[in-house]
Image (cartoon, grey):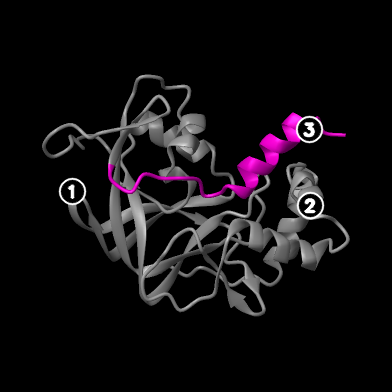
Amino acid sequence: MVDPGAAAAILKRALDYPYATPGHSYLYRDGEAAELPAGRPDLDGRTPLLAYGANAAPAALARKLAPLPGVGIPVLRAELEGFDVVYSAHVSPYGAIPGTLRPSEEAVAPVFVVYPNEEQLALLSATEPNYELRRLGGVICRVEEAGTLNAVDAFASRHGCLTLDAHDVALAAVASANRSLPALTEREVQARVRDLLEPRASLEEFVLAGVDPAVAAARTAALRATANPAVFD
C-alpha cells in the first residue's frame, strides 16, 4: 500500500498537469519565476524550444533543471499559428496523460518559448523519453521580446495523439483560439481513459497504478492502438 502522503503527492503531480504558468514572460531560476531584465533578453548561445505543456511551468523546470542551480533560462510568452495542443497517446513516468502538438489550420495556441543553453537542453531532453526533438519549419510563432520565429524546436510525442470517440482531444488548460477539437481537463481525460481500460478502478486507484513502468507501458500500448499520428512534415 502506498503511504497516504506519497499517494497524495503522486496524484497531485499527475492530475495538476500541465501545471501553473505565469501569464507573462519570465526568467526562470532556482524554482522561481523572476522578472526579465530590462531591455531585450540576451538569447545568444541559446536555442529556442517550444514549451506547450509542463516545460513552461516553474514547478516542472525546478525538477528538471535542479542539477544546474543558479543558471537562469528565459521563458517567453508566444502564439503558435496553425497548431493545437492535444493529449498524447501515452502515460508519463509520473502518471499523467501529457500533451503533444497537432496541426490545426485555424487554431492559434498560447504557448511559451524557452531558451535553454546546451546543458539545460540536455537536461530537458533527458526527461522526455516519450518524445523526440523535432524542428518545426515554416511556422509562425510570435514570441514576446524576441519577434517572430519561422522555425522552432519542439518535443513531439513518439506515440501520436490520443483519440476518444474517434477524435483527438485538446487540453482544456491550453486555451487555443479558433479551436475545432473537443477539450478536456487532465482529471477528465484520466477518467475517460480509466473507463476504457480499467472501469472498475476508482480514478485515484487508476492514476496511482500508472506510475508503475509496466502498467504505464501496457496502457500506452493500448492507447497507441487507436492513436492518430501527429504529422508535422
Residue 203 sits above or below residue 127 on the image: below
Magenta segment includes 63? no
80 or 220: which is nearer to us? 80
Instruction: From the viewer's perspective, tell me whether residue 11 is left or right of residue 85.
Output: right
The spot of residue 154 in percent (x, y) is 40, 53
Pointer 3 residue: 4
For the question of whether residue 94 can be seen, the reply is no
Tell me the CA gap for discs 2 and 1: 42 Å
> Which type of secondary structure does the marked residue at label 2 adopt?
helix
Mark 1 lies on residue: 146
87 left or right, relative to 46? right
* Element assignment for label 1: loop
Percent x, y of residue 48:
30, 46
Furthest-left residue in this view: 39
On screen, residue 55 above or below 69 = below
Q: Are marks 3 and 2 in contact (CB under 8 Å)?
A: no
Depth-wise, is mark 2 or mark 1 nearer the camera?
2
At label 2, the amino acid type is Phe
- In this rendering, position of residue 137 left or right of residue 202: left
Badge 1 amino acid = Ala
Q: Quadrant of residue 93?
A: top right
User: Residue shown at 74%/49% (left/top)?
Assistant: 207
Whichever of labels 3 and 1 marks the residue nearer the N terminus, that label is 3
Q: Position of residue 43 (x, y in %)?
A: 21, 37
Q: CA distance from mark 3 to mark 2?
A: 15 Å
**Magenta highlight on residue 10:** yes
Q: Which mark is residue 206?
A: 2
Q: Amino acid at mark 3?
A: Pro
Q: Nearer the viewer, residue 55 or 226?
A: 55
Start and end of the magenta stretch?
1-25
